[in-house]
Image (spheres, rainbow, N blue to C red):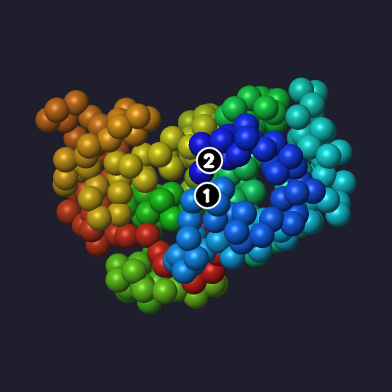
Amino acid sequence: MLARLVKQVTASPDELLPSALASWAEGTVAEVFAISPRQRRKEDPARLAEIIRANFSHYLSVPSERVIARLLDPRAGKDVILATSEWLRSFPAFAGDPLQKKSALFLQRLYLQRYIAPEIAPEIPFAIDRHIVRLALRVGWVRPDPDSALSGKIRNRAHMSRDEDLALRSAVLTAMQMLVDATEIQAPVINFVLWQFARSYCARYKPGCISEPRLLGRGAEFIPPSGEPCLLAAVCLALRDQAQLVTLDPVHRGGFY
């Protein structure tokens, strides 16, 4: 996606101005991202165009440039993160998630790319997605009652309710915050590392501890030396109990992830 956006901004930079994005049509989305109609919902160009129009129309209707200028100011304080979080929460793409996973991810990436002052990193929230949830469940940082309906839904990858999903993700968020406090590693850094580890090495159906991971690029750093266990083997309950493929990430019908 990033490569296609770079190509587009090189060929026709005005097409990526907020005013232009606020009127993008289905055909424009299909052409820029090389996708066709009748794709699965996540890649449906009509749906993507609707989301793009809604978000950039909102961007133009609120004092967005002022918020961004304050956020990128190297003298910014923690109050700026709070204000930016409220601004992001108002966007249609983010509004539905009470834990604001997508907006937290946006702030984290700005921090990791050094666009915002390092002093305000402690105020940047965690982004709790399905990979982080799966890792927390497997390692044992979060342990639902084994006899509960929620545990059964996790094992069977059955759809859970919004309240169940929120309760599970909230528990994982608390665990991640405790991890930050214990390690003194900044939340954006530890969140990114754990997310990369969970989506590459501790994958849903072929975790590296019971398969032969063939990871490239950044994911390759998580492959332990030959004959050695996973980096989290000493603390992983799923590995101890040989229950790796019993512990999967949840399924939710909403747009949180």
Q: Residues within 10 Å of mark 2 (few under 14, many from 20)?
A: few
* Element at label 2: helix
Which residue in the rendered view is the most extreme toward the left?
A: 227
Task: Give residue 4's mark.
Answer: 2
* Element at label 1: helix
Q: Which of 69/228 is in front?
A: 69
Check the image and report above or below for 184 versus 151.
above
Could you tell me residue 27's position as x and y percent? 60, 59
Q: Amino acid at mark 1?
A: Phe
Residue 202 seen in the current view? yes
- Numbered marks: total: 2
Q: Which residue is mark 1?
A: 33
Q: Which of 18/126 is in front?
A: 18
Q: Residues within 10 Å of mark 1 (few under 14, many from 20)?
A: some
Q: Do the residues bearing badges 1 and 2 touch, measured as CB atoms within 8 Å?
A: yes
Could you tell me residue 62's position as x and y percent? 86, 51
Q: Which of 237/249 is in front?
A: 249
Check the image and report above or below for 199 versus 256.
above
Could you tell me residue 178's position as x and y percent? 51, 43
* Mark 1 vs mark 2, CA separation in Å: 6 Å
Q: Amino acid at mark 2?
A: Arg
- Sequence-wise, the earlier of marks 1 and 2 is 2
